[in-house]
Amino acid sequence: MPSENLVFDPRDPDVIQQPLKTLLRLQADDPVHWSPLLKGWVLTRHDDVKAVQLNQGISSDRLTPFFENQPGAEQAKLRDLVHYLNTWVAFKDPPDHTRLRGLLNKVVTPGVMRGLEEGIAELADGLLDRIAARGDGRFECISEFANPLPASVIMDLLGVPRGDMNTLRDWSMLLQPFLGNATASDDKYESGRAGIVAMADYFRDAVADRQRRPRENVISHFVSLQQAGQISDDEVIGSCILFLFAGHETTTNLIGNGIRALLANPEQKARLVADSGLIAGAVEEMLRYEGPTGAVVRVVKAPFELRGKMLKAGDRVFAMVNAANHDPLVFEAPERFDIGRTPNRHLTFNHGIHFCLGAPLARSEGRIAIGRFLARFPDAKVESDTAVYMDTLTMRGVRDMWMLTS
C-alpha cells in the first residue's frame, strides 16, 4: 500500500486489538505520520521516539493546551480533571518538573523499593493460594492476580487500608479512558471527573488524618513536605492519585501481558521453568514485546524538522513506544519473543528526565509475581487465544484473561 494511503485509525476495533499491524507498516513507509484523526504526529521509529523522550523542546504539558482549545461547555466538564492532573510530575516541564521530581525521589528511595520485596512475595503467594484452594482449575488472571497484587503494594506504600482497594480501583478505572486517550468512549470526560474528584476527596481525608497522626508511609512523607512549604496542598493530593493510578495500572498490564506472552511461547516458558535465574531478562523482554505503555503524548514547543516533515509549535506528538520496541533497525528479529535477548534497549520506562519513577518497583513486582505464578502453575494455559484489549491509546492491556491451571 502506498504510504500516502496509510491511515492510523485508533477507533478501528481491529487497530485497538492489534495496533502493531498498522504501526509497523507506518514504521517502514511513513515513520513520521500525520494523523488527521488524532490531529497529531505518529512516530514509530526507535530513534525518533527516544529523541522525543529526551527533547527539551517538546513539552509534557499536553493537558493545558488541550483544555484551552475546548469550548466552554467542555471546559466545565474538564476543569476538575485538568486541575488535579496538572499537578502530576508526568505532565510538568522544568523547572516545576525538576522541583517536584526531586521531592518525589526523597519519598520513594531505592531502599524503600527494596524493602517492599518480601511483602510482594507474600502477596503473590497469598493470591495464588486462594486460587489453588478453590480447586476448580480455572481463574481470571487480571482481577484475581495481576491487578490486586500491585494495587495492594501501592495501598501499603501509601499507607491506606487494603480494604479500600476495590473502591479505589473502581475510581481509578473511571479515570483510565481519559488518561489512556480512549477513542471509543463517549463519556470519558464525565467518568474521569467523577473518578478523580472521588479520589481527591478520599486522599484529602487521608492527608488530614496524617497531619494529626503522622506515620511511616508515603502520605505522611508528603505531609511533612507540605508542612515545610516545599509542596502545595493540591500537589500532595495529585501526587497521591498519581501513585495510586500509575503504581498499579501499568504493572497490572505488565504482569497480564507478560504471562500471556510467556504462555504463547512454550519454548521460552520451558527455558524459564528450567532456569528461574532468567526471570529478570524475561521481564525486560515482556516490557519490550508487548509492554504496558502503548504511547507517550507530547506537545511541540519549538518547531523542528524530522525526516523531512516540519513539526510546528503546538502540534501534538504521539510517540508509539511499543512500535519503537519492534524496530528492526534496533532489535534483531523483533517479532520473536526471546527471554534471553541482549541487549534489550526498550523504551517502555521512558528516557531522560521523565524516566519512570516506579520502574524499580514495577520490575520487582514483575519478577516476583510472574516467577511465583510459574512455579505454582507450571502447566497453566490461557483458556482462549482471543483477547479483548482496553480501548486506550497510551496503555496496553487485556480486560480479562481466563486461565486453566492445568
Image (tube, grey):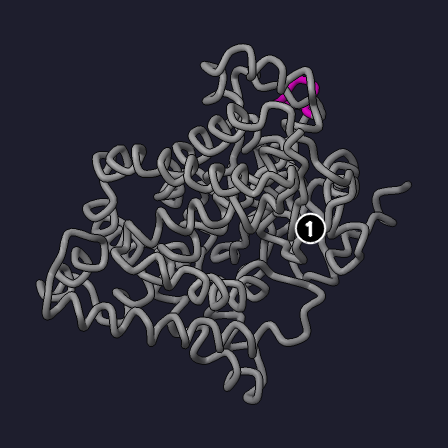
Residue visible at 35% across and 50% down in the picture: 154
Foreground of the two, 131 or 97:
131
Residue visible at 60% across and 33% down in the picture: 259
Residue visible at 44% across and 50% down in the picture: 248
Q: Which residue is mark 1?
A: 389
Tally of marks: 1
Q: Residues within 10 Å of mark 1 (few under 14, many from 20)?
A: some
Tell me where the magenta segment starts and ends, as one range.
329-334
Q: Decide whether residue 286 is among the magenta residues.
A: no
Looking at the rendered image, the quarter that the C terminus falls into is: top right
Q: Give above or below for 394 relative to 377.
A: below
**Dot 1 amino acid type:** Tyr
Residue visible at 70% across and 36% down in the picture: 382
- x and y percent of residue 396 in the render? 61, 47
- Determine which quarter of the picture holds residue 340: top right
Q: Main secondary structure of the magenta part?
A: loop
Q: Give above or below for 191 relative to 59.
A: below
Foreground of the two, 208 or 344:
208
